[in-house]
Each structure stands twice: as structure tokens, then as C-alpha cells.
Amino acid sequence: MRSPAVDHSMGTNKIWLQVSRIVQQTRDSVQVFFVVENEQPLTYKAGQFLTLIFPDLGLSEIRRSYSISSSPAAQEPLSICVKRTVNGSVSSFLTRKLQVGDGLQSLPPAGQFVLPPADAGGEDLVFIGGGSGLTPLFSLIKEALLRQPRRRIHLILANRNEDHILFREELQAWQRRFPDRFRIIHWLSAPHGRLDLGTGEGLDTVVRPGRLSNLALEMMLQRELGEALPDAHAFLCGPPGLMLKAEMTLRFMGFSENRLHKEDFVIHEPFRPAPEGLPDSLVTVKGVGQFKLSAGQSILEAALAADVELPYSC
């Protein structure tokens, strides 16, 4: 007997997904397509992520979050993209051992890396990414092209070479569909020139060799956006170095907090005050229950110690 599509036990909704298709995107990345078991509808927003739960891959339960690559507006099957990382037990399993028909457990879609409302001002959206950071950006791009017809899309994508670009053919297909609204600038640090990225068929694509510097990004944005620069929204997702460089440049150019959107894959260690002088206390979580919080503990640590399940990701 199959598990229910949504499990309401332990105070946390869980979704049961079945793998319907696996596509090799690059040498070390796969796109995994799902159907929700029992064909239950699943509501999500472009740019959000799924947190997959693996009870048996390690000594204790492991959770990993992966950005959704599909778009609700495109009415596509739900999908994520996974890049294998060195010594990554979960990514190695998903990229090497996962098979069509396998079932996975997940928390409901979550995340605030979503499009601004169509009436939020500015007709230009700039997406800056690299590597697997393209995954949520691609979801947002498809959503904007379909649901916000006034928007012009500029994708600045940094990779080592052509073989490392995710969704190559899909990106070109969307450019053909929206030739006047979707422009791509590829920055390749070590291009080999064996693949046509759309320039040969007249798509609005530019390929530049070298690394994307702060100055190059600033000049490119000024050239791309022109007078639209003060109202444009920017979306960032990629390796930490690229994210830092892009954010510094955008802030220098005057992008305000409400026009700068980031999805950060890096887990930053939060500030932890010294436990001396801090009291023990009780924490009440609506729909879950009450548990003890010792001095120096985080709420998540206290919940785990009390065997109370919270909807955490990592």
C-alpha cells in the first residue's frame, strides 16, 4: 500500500513524490521530474525549492533543499535540478543511483525567491547566475515570460565552458518563443567553441570569453538597461564569489533592497551568544507542541533533542 500523498503526522505536512523522468543536463547534473503520488495537486511558486527527506542515507535523517526548475505558468511536470558535489552523499545518490519509479519524501514547496508583482514597477528583469544557480532563475524566467508580458528578460550567465551550461536547448527554445523579450549574455571563462549557443541562428545571444568582473558587469548593465536601469529588478543565484561580486556591483549602481533579490545556497553560521547568564525556557510551536529550550541552544537543536519534528530544511 502506497503512503498518502500528503502526510499530516508529527505536525508537519510531507509530500510523497514519484520519479517520472531523469534527464542528464551536464556531466555532473541531472534534472529530475516528479509526479505527486495519488495525483494530488501541488501548488508552488516559480523560484521556490523542495526539501527532500532521506531517512536511510546516513546515521540519522538527512534533508537537502533543491530549487524547482519547472514553472507553474508553463504547466510543466514538477522538476528539480541536482549537481553532484564532492563527497555529497545525497547529491551522489540523486545523480547516480536514483531511478524512474523511485519514491521520495519532501516537505511542501517553500522560499521567498519569487517574482515581484507585475505592477511592482520596472519592465526589465535582470537575472545573474552561474552553474546550478540557473535552476531557480530559469523557473522565474519562464514564469515572467508567460505571466508578465510587459517584462523584458536579460540573463547574464557565467560558466566555465559550453558543456557546463544547464538547460542549453531549453533556453534557446524559450528565446525562439519570445525573440523580442529574452536576451542571454554568456560569460565563459574557458570556452572551447564547439557548441553553438544560438548566435548562429540569430537568437538574441551574446557569448563573451573571460571572467565576469565588477567593471564588466557594471558596463554591461548600463548598456543593456540604459534609462530603464533605475527601475529594473535583479535576481542573483550562483557560486558565492559570483553572488558577492554581483551584489556589490548592483548596490554600487544604486539597486535598492526591494529591487535586489538573492537565493543563497550557502549555509551561514548564525550568531550564537554565550550561554552564561541565559535562562532555560519553554518554547511553544503552534500545531506541534511545547518543549524545553536550554541556554545556548537554538530552537531547532532543542526540538531535535526533544524528538519534536519541526519543518526545517537543513
Image (cartoon, rainbow, N blue to C red):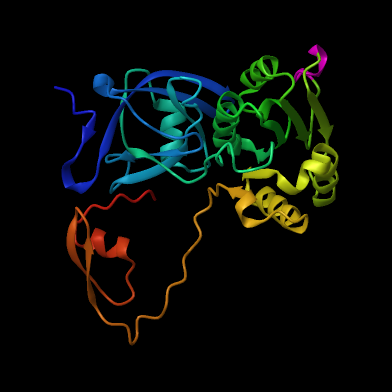
Answer whether residue 211 is visible to the viewer in this image: no
**Residue 198 appears left or right of 291:** right
Query: In the rendered view, would you say 139 is above or below 115?
Result: above
Give the vertical position of 234 relative to 307 (above or below). above
Residue 157 occupies which quadrant of the picture? top right
Q: Is 88 or 157 nearer to us in this picture?
A: 157
For this orientation, the residue located farthest to the left is 1
Name the residue located 55 percent from the left edge and 40 percent from the top edge: 117
**Residue closest to the eye, 55 or 2:** 2
Q: How many marks?
A: 0
Residue located at (61% from left, 26% from top): 145
**Image location of residue 294, percent across then percent down:** 26, 74
The x, y position of residue 299, in whole percent, is: 31, 64
Looking at the picture, tell me which residue is in the foreground, 294 or 250. Answer: 250
Is residue 153 highlighted in magenta? Answer: no
Q: Is residue 155 left or right of residue 147?
A: right
- Given the current orientation, which residue lies at the most extreme bottom position? 277
Residue 243 falls left or right of residue 43 = right
Front residue of 231/288: it is 231
Prevailing SS of the magenta stretch: loop
Quarter holding the N terminus is top left
In the current view of this chain or complex, which residue is farthest to the top? 201
Q: Is residue 299 above or below residue 310?
A: below
Asked if residue 14 can be seen in this view, the reply is yes
Q: Quadrant of residue 32?
A: top left
> Which residue range is magenta in the image?
194-201
- Tell me which residue sits at (46%, 66%) in the image: 270
Residue 216 location in percent, x, y? 84, 45
Give the residue displayed 53% in from the left and 48% down from the top. Answer: 265
Q: Position of residue 144 (x, y in %)?
A: 59, 30
